[in-house]
Image (cartoon, helix red, strand yellow):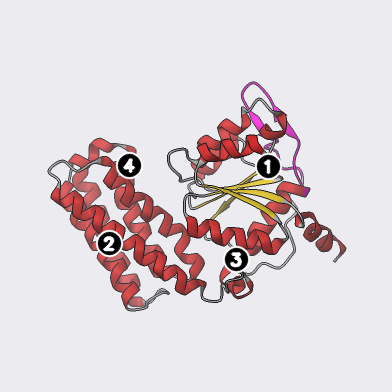
Amino acid sequence: MQTGRRQDDALTGRSALLIDDNAFMRRLVRSLLRQFGFDDIHEAADGSEALLRVTERQFDVIVCDWMMEPTDGYAFVRSLRQHAVPAVQTLPVVMLTAVAAQNKVMAARDAGVTEYLVKPVSSGKLRARLIAALIRSRDFVVADDYVGPDRRRRDDVEYQGTRRRLSDRLRSLTDEEGEDWANAAANYATVLRGDIERMQVELAGIAADARPSFEAWRSVHRMAHDLKGQAPTFGYVAAAEIAGSLERLLRPAMQAPDMLERAGERRLRAGKTHVEALSLILEQGITGRSPETDALAERLNRTVERVHRESLL
């Protein structure tokens, strides 16, 4: 019990820089940090803005997303670790992101990330990573080919505090104006509806354009990626699965834009079908998985595979 108390006290009165281009997620993570005891929380919408903030004042820790524009979290961490001011260069960074691929996790580690946490976020896991970054920190290494916390984890003791999902804690969270977060899931429905409408607009523009821009497709991919990571936090598991399928549909073309010229009509139809499915389950109030949503996801996944096969011909 004394260890738990010491860990809780370690977060009280701390300062943090929160970096995420999604205002709703910044608001939510800010509330969690405040509940942990942080009393000085600043925000930035991308890595470029964050690099300016870290030169203006000192923070105890940074909580950073990966997928941001114009400067993403990976580029931010690399720049931070090369900073000329040692107090800035050595700042602990907790990367909180929907990017879960093993090669990306390893790349973040090699860029100098202190702790890595995949969305959907839970209060217990975020608290554990913050404690690891702040009071169980590793030696800082400055070498020719690496700058960052020692990648060898000599002390990897699991945090033993309360580990409840974020959805179990939402009722006790308040923002700085004192607004009750008990209806956070309903608030997220509005966010989800807005993202669906924006994807519909982007896809309509792509359909009307004889030579659709890469930026329009990338916008849809980004929103699908964010929904895949964020929706489960608020109980929208079915929406997250469909968004994940849409993200997989577009991922190869994001990595090789010339693929957009292949299977273009089929990709567009598949994209519209995914967004229509998202709209349908939202309007019907469907959140969790069921045999019906599993069957829908399977059909969408088969559609994705057909687009991928046609793109390779």
Q: Are marks 4 and 2 in contact (CB under 8 Å)?
A: no
Q: Amino acid at mark 1?
A: Pro
Q: Which residues are magenta?
A: 135-154
User: Residue sitting at 29 percent across and 69 percent down?
Assistant: 279
Helix, strand or loop at label 3? It is loop
Q: Which of the marked residues, 4 or 2, is nearer the chain's N terminus?
A: 4
> What residue did someone put label 3 on?
175
> What residue did someone put label 4 on?
254
Which label belongs to residue 92?
A: 1
Q: Are marks 3 and 4 in contact (CB under 8 Å)?
A: no
Disc 1 or disc 2, which is closer to the eye? 1
Q: Which of the marked residues, 3 or 1, is nearer the chain's N terminus?
A: 1
Q: Is residue 246 above or below residue 259?
A: below
Which label belongs to residue 274?
A: 2
Q: Are marks 3 and 2 in contact (CB under 8 Å)?
A: no
Question: Which quarter of the rendering shows the N terminus?
Answer: bottom right
Label 1 CA crowd tier, 10 Å (few <14, some 14–19, many 20+): many
Q: Amino acid at mark 4?
A: Met
